Image (spheres, rainbow, N blue to C red):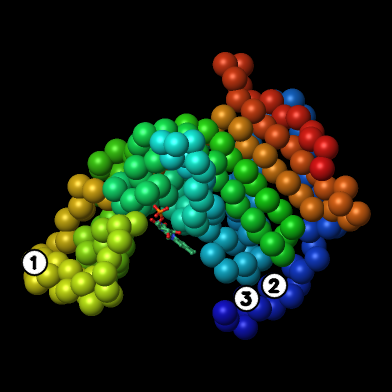
Amino acid sequence: MSLISKLRCALTLGQGVLLSLPEPKGNEDPFTLFGDWFKQAEKSGIVLPESMTISSIGADGRPSARVVLLKDFDEKGFVFYTNYTSRKGQELDLNPVACLTFHWNILQRQVRIEGRVERVSHEESNQYFHTRGRGSQIGAWASQQSQVIAQRSLLEQRVEHYKQKFSNKDVPLPDFWGGYRVIPDSIEFWQGKADRLHDRFRYTCDAKGWKADRLSP
Ligand SMILES: Cc1cc2nc3c(=O)[nH]c(=O)nc-3n(C[C@H](O)[C@H](O)[C@H](O)COP(=O)(O)O)c2cc1C
């Protein structure tokens, strides 16, 4: 971590308990609030503020969770990229609902986002894939994500294979790789406060738009 990031961390430490969530006014826009919080998390010096836990549900109803990186968000939803044949990919295709959780520890903030999930368009995945470094592009081809692999050298052999295959060429987007968008119908903001009397506001969406309710901590 750079010195400036460390200083930012030190300055922000404990700030969470001093902050209150703005009282909802009735016609709320949780995306603006999320954007404000995300910017503050980026400025705070937290490492990887864009990391979030995505929970999915398997065919047997059993939940599973793992960390991924948020790559884009707007009113359409929250986007991350992965291997579509991975465990999460299979679970999200079978049962297209998910929960995302952010924890910005030094700000004492948590955000929970729930909703349905869709694959992003091929164009969107393709555009994003080509912003990645060549090493990550080859890595996406080489990794059969979530499958058992006998030894690391097999992965390294696959990397070599794809390096040769695409030498002197653009690495194309694999058809088994791309983005998912979580389209929220519920977004809960949690602000840590003293004596466990935290602020919690849950924004839910129906045909009339978004409304906010305060929840007991
Ligand atoms: C900080 C961090 C960021 C990660 N970002 C991603 C990501 O954006 N996409 C991804 O597929 N896996 C990412 N991973 C790896 C996943 O947590 C997970 O191991 C992998 O996707 C396989 O999950 P699955 O077997 O449940 O499908 C990340 C892990 C960490 C710790």
- Does dot 2 land on a helix, a strand or a loop? helix
Asked whether 58 or 211 is in front, the reply is 58
Residue at image point 35% right, 45% down: 89
Residue found at the far bottom of this picture = 3
Residue found at the far right of this picture = 195
The part of the image, by quadrant, that contains residue 188 is top right
Image quarter for ligand 1: bottom left
Cβ–Cβ below 8 Å for labels 3 and 2? yes
Q: CA distance from mark 2 to mark 1?
A: 44 Å
Q: Which residue is mark 2?
A: 9
Q: Which amino acid type is marked by label 2?
A: Cys
The quarter in which the C terminus is drawn is top right
Q: CA distance from mark 1 to mark 3?
A: 40 Å
Asked whether 147 or 9 is in front, the reply is 147
**Location of residue 157 in the rendering, given as x and y in whole percent from the top left corner:** 17, 74
Asked whether 66 or 47 is in front, the reply is 66
Neighbourhood count class around disc 1 (C-alpha, 10 Å): few under 14, some 14–19, many 20 upward: few
**Location of residue 83 in the rendering, given as x and y in whole percent from the top left corner:** 31, 52
Residue at image point 25% right, 42% down: 123
| Residue 109 to residue 22: above or below | below
Neighbourhood count class around disc 2 (C-alpha, 10 Å): few under 14, some 14–19, many 20 upward: some
Residue at image point 26% right, 62% down: 143
Nearer to us of marks 1 and 3 is: 1
- The numbered disc on residue 165 is 1
